[in-house]
Image: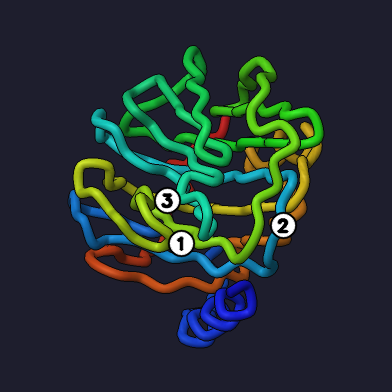
Amino acid sequence: MRQLLVFLALLCAGHATQEDLSEKVFIFPVQSATSAVKLVPYGQGPFSSLTMCMRFLSSTTRAQSLFSFAIQSQHNAFLLYKPSVGTYRMHVNGVALDITGLPDKTDEWNSVCWTWDSTNGLTALWINGERSTRRVLGTKVSLEGSPSIILGQEQDSYGGGFDQSQSFVGEITDVHLWNSVISPCEIRAFMDGSTFTSGNLLNWNNMQYTITGPVYVEPSDFDKLTCL
């Protein structure tokens, strides 16, 4: 089964667009059950630590998915979800943890980084330059197999099971993923828009992706991008 999943991942990668997306954004203009971007990572599991960084702009106040990472055995393997304005929900291997009190913005760019280390389960969320207290989530967990990584939708099954009411509406840019916990200095550089080491699993400057539904790739208006 593992060999089949790897083969399917490589097959999908062969049909994916590969592009430098610097100074570009994915635009999700409408609520939809079909609009999604599948990102092809540069590596397979097992994963025992991860860091994900991204920026998003949205006026939506209902629940929506920001970053969905599924494996065959668990569709909420590494999921960042927004139940409401000001609340972020992190899932690791199906277990959820809510974070509140960070400087969340509506109709402005938000810079987000999320770190997780299964060795001790320590996890933290950074929003617009401020970090949550470190919490424990997914201790001794290993995420096995080929990941399905989706922007714009929350996966209720491996690679699918989308729900229109959870779809993202807005713009996403600068998505990076590392198979380690990167340093606070690297996170600060990302937040500030300074030079940082690109993700080794997902790299916005060399991204493989496929689009379904009404999603558009357009130039980013970096003059209005503010990273605090």
Height in image: 28 above or below 227? below
Q: Which SS class for mark 3?
A: strand
Height in image: 226 above or below 11? above
Residue located 63% across and 79% down the image: 3
- Where is mark 1, residue-wise? 24
| Distance between the alpha carbons at the discs numbered 3 and 1 | 9 Å
- Where is mark 3, residue-wise? 172
Residue found at the very far front of the displayed protein:
1
Residue located 31% across and 65% down the image: 216
Residue located 72% across and 57% down the image: 46
Circle 2 or circle 1, nearest the eye: 2
Does the residue at mark 3 contact the one at mark 1 (Cβ under 8 Å)? no
Side of 164 where 109 appears, left or right:
right
If you read the primary sequence from the N terminus, does the residue marked by circle 3 or circle 1 appear first?
A: 1
Q: Quadrant of residue 186?
A: top right
Q: Which SS class for mark 2?
A: loop
Q: Nearer the viewer, residue 180 or 170?
A: 180
Q: Amino acid at mark 1?
A: Lys
| Distance between the alpha carbons at the discs numbered 3 and 2 | 27 Å
If you read the primary sequence from the N terminus, does the residue marked by circle 3 or circle 2 appear first?
A: 2
Circle 3 or circle 1, nearest the eye: 3
Measured as percent of width and height from the top left, residue 147 is found at 56, 61
Q: Amino acid at mark 2?
A: Pro
Q: Quadrant of residue 188?
A: top right
- Structural crowding at the residue carrying mark 2, measured as other residues with C-alpha within 10 Å and reported as few (<14), some (14–19) or many (≥20): some
Q: Nearer the viewer, residue 222 or 207?
A: 207
Query: How did the renderer colour the structure?
Result: rainbow
